[in-house]
Image: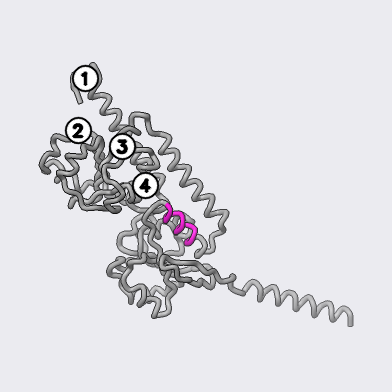
Amino acid sequence: MADLLRSWAQSLALVGAMWGCALPAQAVIVLDDRQQKVQIAQAPQRIVSLLPSLTETVCALQQCHKLVGLDRYSNWPESVKAIPRVGGGLDPNIESIVALKPDLVLAAGSTRGADRLQALGLNVLRLEPRNHADALRVWRTVAQALNVPAADSDKVWQDIQQGVQAAVASLSPAARQQRVYFEVSPAPYGASESSFMGETLKRMGVGNILPASMGPFPQVNPEWVVQARPDVIMAGDSSRASMAQRPGWSRLRAMQGQRLCVFTPEESDMLVRAGPRMAEGASLMAGCLNRAAAQADALVSPNSGVLR
């Protein structure tokens, strides 16, 4: 009888263990950008991302394999290019998203159709990083939502910050004395001190001709830039052609001294996205600033015969 009871108890323990393994993980509750609670019952296995910086965050957290649908602009890392596209933040394809049966949709706060997706029963987490503080907050929120251990996500974030600090430390003393105009589109719109790129420049101790009071990405009068006389100009490739045609720009020291850094579309994506590639973006900026400072030194060299 004792043996029978012992065998029965062992069987119950085995069944209990099996049921324990089958039970879903404890639900996670996170706050989105609207300060609304989003409950995630278990670690998501099918994720749709509608913002490039969120896509990059998922992949940097080693969860790229769970992405089943993306916005049309997500293009890093290379592996995501094969994932189905479901429109963009302004025009998401609701039917396509629903058909993918995601257990989590990551979207910007401004994404159209997010309310509709929620009404259809999908779990939507709205996050939109715009600055360095946002990038950290979103990083931690996504890690929590994806059930990535805090120790693991914190380690990756520390590596990112060490990369940013290495870029800052690489600046020469002369590079730190320069004032920058960063153009984000040929309209032209610039990146002020309060933008993500502006915050990176500030962390480097470099001046920005566009103050924070103008807003993150103000439209700029080209003549105002001439009056501000930046030492260095950073811009995307789409601005290159129009710059030479703007009145007075040929007289700018940055233009005359070839202290102009033109970034490829891929580099521009890296620079403007408030996400896990901020260290690479900071390195691009630091390289530009160091080259510009070296170019300025060459222009005043006794052997050059050229005065700044």
Give the x, y percent position of residue 235: 24, 45
In the image, which is nearer the foreground, mark 2 or mark 3?
2
The residue indicated by pointer 4 is 199
20, 171: nearer the viewer: 171
Q: Amino acid at mark 2?
A: Arg
* Quarter of the figure with the C terminus: top left
Furthest toward the front, the residue is 213
Which badge, 1 or 3, is on the more N-terminal residue? 3
**From the viewer's perspective, is residue 166 above or below residue 110?**
above
Q: Residue at point 67% right, 74% down? A: 18
For numbered disc 3, what is the local secondary structure? helix
Q: Residues within 10 Å of mark 3 (few under 14, many from 20)?
A: many
275, 74: nearer the viewer: 275
The residue indicated by pointer 3 is 288
Q: Which mark is residue 197?
A: none
Furthest toward the top, the residue is 302
In the image, which is nearer the foreground, mark 4 or mark 3?
4
The secondary structure that dominates the magenta segment is: helix
Along the horizontal axis of the image, is 308 left or right of 274? left
Q: Residue at point 19% right, 47% down? A: 239
Q: CA distance from mark 2 to mark 3?
A: 16 Å
The residue indicated by pointer 2 is 253
* Quarter of the figure with the N terminus: bottom right
Which badge, 4 or 1, is on the more N-terminal residue? 4
Give the x, y percent position of residue 4: 85, 81
- Magenta stretch in the rendered image: 133-142
